[in-house]
Amino acid sequence: MDILANALNVIRVHKNAGKDECKIVASNFTGEVLKIMQKEGYIREFTRVTEGPTDFFLVKGIGPINYCGVIKPRFPIKFSDIGKAEEQYLPSKDFGILIITTSKGMVTNKEIRSLKTGGRLVAYVY
C-alpha cells in the first residue's frame, strides 16, 4: 500500500467531486509533498490532526488541480534528463510540476535546475 498514492488519489477525487477539503493519512513523506503543493498553489492549507491512534492531514482549499499522481517505481533521474521527464509526465511546457527527492530535500522540477543535481522522481501535479 502506497500512502502517497492514496493521498493524491483522495485529493484528486475530492477536487473532481467539487469538495474543498479532505482527510488523508499522515506521514512525514506525504507532509513534504503537501508542503510543495501548498507552495506551488495547488492547495491552500493543511494541518496535522491526531484523532485516537491515527494521524491524518486535513487539507483545505484544494486549488487548480487537473490531475496528480505518483511515479512508480521512483526512477532515478540525472540533471540532464529533467526535460525528458517533463515531456513524459506533464501535458505541456511550464504547465504543472514534477516533485523530485534529492539529497538536499524535496524540490520541484523548476528548483532542481538551480541546484544542478539529480534525484528520484516522486510525483507529478498539473
Image (spheres, rainbow, N blue to C red):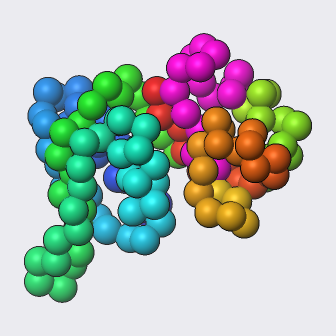
Q: Nearer the viewer, residue 65 or 72?
A: 65
Q: Position of residue 70 (x, y in %)?
A: 53, 45
Q: Position of residue 30 (x, y in %)?
A: 42, 61
Q: Is residue 99 left or right of residue 10?
A: right
Location of the N terminus by quadrant is bottom left
Q: Position of residue 83 (x, y in %)?
A: 77, 27
Image-quadrant location for residue 81? top right
Q: Position of residue 95 (x, y in %)?
A: 53, 20
Q: Residue at x 11, y 77 (%)?
A: 51
Q: Residue at x 11, y 83 (%)?
A: 52
Outermost residue toward the front? 114
State whether residue 51 appears in this view: yes
* 97 is within the stretch colored magenta: yes
Q: Nearer the viewer, residue 39 or 88?
A: 39
Q: Is residue 20 left or right of residue 35?
A: left
Q: Residue at x 29, y 41 (%)?
A: 43
Q: Is residue 88 left or right of residue 15?
A: right
Q: Is residue 22 above or below residue 30?
A: above
Q: Residue at x 68, y 64 (%)?
A: 104
* 89 is within the stretch colored magenta: yes
Residues in magenta, as a range? 86-100
